[in-house]
Amino acid sequence: MELAFRERENQINYMNEKLPQQLIEARIESKRVRPGSRGIRLPGNREDGLRAFNESINRAFKESVEELNERMRRANFNLHYHNGFIQISNDELMNEQVEEPFWAVINSLLWKNVDIDMKEAIDLRDSNGRDPAFYAARALESTIKIISDQKGFTHGSEKGAHNYIDNLGSKKNGGYINEWERESLKSFFTAVRNSFSHGPGSDDMPKLTEQQTDWTIESCMSWIKSLVKRM
C-alpha cells in the first residue's frame, strides 16, 4: 500500500513540475495564428483546462491520503502517510496541528533534503536508533539555507548555521525573522545540534531522553513550517 501511494505521489509531483512549461506552451499556442487555416477550433482555453485537470488530480490524491490516514486512525494503528512514507504517529493533536501542515509545506523538490532528513529522524526515533535529533536539526539547517539562497540573502562567506540565521534576521534583508527568533534558533543549534555533530572526546556520549527527542523533532517541524510559510 505504501509503495502504491508513493508511486502515485511521484507521478503527480512529476506532473506538477511539468505544468508551468505546459502552461507557457499552451499560452503561446493559443496566440499563434495559422494563415489559411479552416480547421475547427474547439471552444475554451487550453491553459485553463490544463490547470483545472492538474488541480483535480492533486485534489483526488489528497482526498485519498486523507481517507487512508483516517482509516488508520479509526483502526488505532497509530500510523500516518505523508510524502511517500507511512510512519508512526502517536499524538493525534500534534499530528493535526504540526506534522500534517509540516509535510504539506515541504512537499516539493525544493525541500527534498529537508524531507529526507526529517524522515530519517523519525525512523531513527521510532526504531530507537542513534541521534535522531541530529537529522531533525539538519532538516532545519537546510531550510534556513534554502530560504537564505532563495531570498538572495546568501553572500558566500557563511561558515555555519549561525551565519545563515543572521542572514534571515538582518535588518538589511528586511528582518525575515525577529531578534528573539534569531537568538532562539542560535541557542538551539549551539545546545542541541552541535552536541551531536562534534565528537565528545573523553566526555560522555551525548544522548537525549525520549521526551527530549520528541521535543526536538516537533520543534524543528514547527520552525520549518513557520519559516517556509513566510516565503
Image: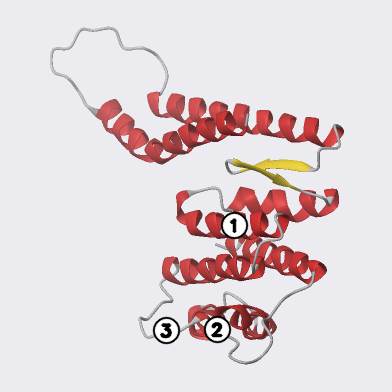
| Horizontal arrangement in the rendering, residue 40 relative to residue 77 (left or right) | left
Q: Which residue is label 2 attached to?
A: 198
Quadrant location, the N terminus:
top right
SS assignment at label 1:
helix
Which residue is the extreme one toward the left?
Answer: 36
Q: How far across and down, in percent of the image, does residue 68 sit?
A: 72, 31
Q: How far across and down, in percent of the image, does residue 22 sit?
A: 34, 33
Q: Please name the amino acid that badge 3 sits on.
A: Glu
Q: Closer to the camera: disc 2 or disc 3? A: 2
Q: Which residue is label 1 attached to?
A: 120
SS assignment at label 3:
loop
- Height in image: 88 above or below 201? above
Q: Residue at x 84, y 51 (%)?
A: 93
The earlier-in-sequence mark between 1 and 3 is 1
Q: Which of the 4 quarters of the picture holds residue 42? A: top left
The earlier-in-sequence mark between 2 and 3 is 3
Q: Which residue is label 3 attached to?
A: 158
Q: Please name the amino acid that badge 1 sits on.
A: Glu
